[in-house]
Image (cartoon, helix red, strand yellow):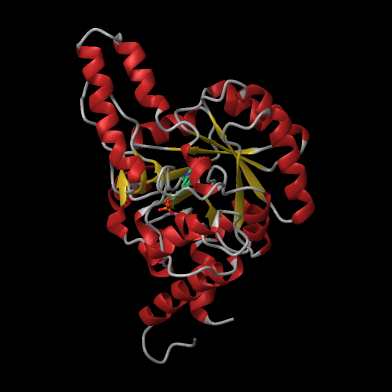
């Protein structure tokens, strides 16, 4: 093995040990996309697949985990959304099926959820939006953290990955493994985050067009055509009616969403709706929209969640090829840093 590859293995050793993988690349859970096939493909290729539970019932999650276990003997994780009404039951399902890693997403988890998942034998990964929250999550038992910048696809925070990395890594990277996510499309940037103290990375957008991904051909085509600037956060028209920002490709649905908010808020102002009902109408606008795009292929009226790295998705490729490309780019970047004449 060349010196650069050994250097990469050293840089992300803690991440590989934590995940139990060859490479410390997590496939970020993507609702509807990260099901058994893509998750198994990522894990079989040496990375770490994460099943997206989304709004599945405990029975559905159980079936999906078992199906994934048939497709891979390698480690994979399960992503649970903290506001799921049956979160406690979902954690029990993960315990019963001996899931090694539970990722708690979509809001700050309760200490009790972390404790229970750990009692059942899982390592728990949480998302840290700030350094203060990172420390709190470690205090209440998180085994590892993901910091995810605003460049990411799906639900996003307001701060760039590069800034979160500078603010959070120096504070907590010595205490727990930290994975960086958001806007990662190539191996060179993986090296940069590892050199800053991260132990690995998490990518979502880059895996959508994997051959093994079941996303509809229209969804994949939309990714292949899009540039970074097409992946925009959902617009909010009135500070009194907050919209949870979601990064997705601009399409008919996202343009109509602006009109829709004006229309609902207009009805509120006329007294036809109270504030709560108006807020609910706005929130419900996107209900079922991701499924419509990913599964049904309606990429104009559905939600085509995508991160800014979408511009670096240029074709459908096998998962193993995507992972190998990232690793080769990382190795080449490290090799370029070696002094001339050093063994390669
Ligand atoms: C289509 C899509 C769906 C997603 N769904 C989820 C989800 O259900 N749960 C979650 O924690 N993150 C979700 N994410 C975020 C990913 O897990 C991952 O953190 C993110 O894509 C990383 O940033 P990147 O897209 O720039 O690679 C989603 C992202 C995309 C693109």
Which of the pair 50/34 is nearer the observer? Answer: 34
Does 333 appear above or below 156? below
Residue 233 position by quadrant: top left
* The N terminus lies in quadrant: bottom right
Left or right: residue 165 versus residue 295 is left
Left or right: residue 5 versus residue 187 is right
Q: Residue at x 39, y 69 (%)?
A: 188
- Where is residue 274 drawn, in percent x and y? 30, 8
Which of the pair 54/219 is nearer the observer? Answer: 219
Q: Is residue 14 visible?
A: no
Q: Pick out the residue farthest to the bottom.
A: 341
- Where is residue 312 drawn, in percent x and y? 39, 66
Q: Residue at x 37, y 21 (%)?
A: 281
Left or right: residue 116 versus residue 146 is right
Does 220 appear above or below 235? below
Q: Residue at x 71, y 27 (%)?
A: 92
- Where is residue 97 drawn, in percent x and y? 77, 37
Q: Is residue 2 visible?
A: yes
- Where is residue 266 drawn, in percent x and y? 21, 19
Q: Residue at x 36, y 85 (%)?
A: 339
Which of the pair 19/97 is nearer the observer? Answer: 97
Does 160 appear above or below 44? above
């Amino acid at each position: 093995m060349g010196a650069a590859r050994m250097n990469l293995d050293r840089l992300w050793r803690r991440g590989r040990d934590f995940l139990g993988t060859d490479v410390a690349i997590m496939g970020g859970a993507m609702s509807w996309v990260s099901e058994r096939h893509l998750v198994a493909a990522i894990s079989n290729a040496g990375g770490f697949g994460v099943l997206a539970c989304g709004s599945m019932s405990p029975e559905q999650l159980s079936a999906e985990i078992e199906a994934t276990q048939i497709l891979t003997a390698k480690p994979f994780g399960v992503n649970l959304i903290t506001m799921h009404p049956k979160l406690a039951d979902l954690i029990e399902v993960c315990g019963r099926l001996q899931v090694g890693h539970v990722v708690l997403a979509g809001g700050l988890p309760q200490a009790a959820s972390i404790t229970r998942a750990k009692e059942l034998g899982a390592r728990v990964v949480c998302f840290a939006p700030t350094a203060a929250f990172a420390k709190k999550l470690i205090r209440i038992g998180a085994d590892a953290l993901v910091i995810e910048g605003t460049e990411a696809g799906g639900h996003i925070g307001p701060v760039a990955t590069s800034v979160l990395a500078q603010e959070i890594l120096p504070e907590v990277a010595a205490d727990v493994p930290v994975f960086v996510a958001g806007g990662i499309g190539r191996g060179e940037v993986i090296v940069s985050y590892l050199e800053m103290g991260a132990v690995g990375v998490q990518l979502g957008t880059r895996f959508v067009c994997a051959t093994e991904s079941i996303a509809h051909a229209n969804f994949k085509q939309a990714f292949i055509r899009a540039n970074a600037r097409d992946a925009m956060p959902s617009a909010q028209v009135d500070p009194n009616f907050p919209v949870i920002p979601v990064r997705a490709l601009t399409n008919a649905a996202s343009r109509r969403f602006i009109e829709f908010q004006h229309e609902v808020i207009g009805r509120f102002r006329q007294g036809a709706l109270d504030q709560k009902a108006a807020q609910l109408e706005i929130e419900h606008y996107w209900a079922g929209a991701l499924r419509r795009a990913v599964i049904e292929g309606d990429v104009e009226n559905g939600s085509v969640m995508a991160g800014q790295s979408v511009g670096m998705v240029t074709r459908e490729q096998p998962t193993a090829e995507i992972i190998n490309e990232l690793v080769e780019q990382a190795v080449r970047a490290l090799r370029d840093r070696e002094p001339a004449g050093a063994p390669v």
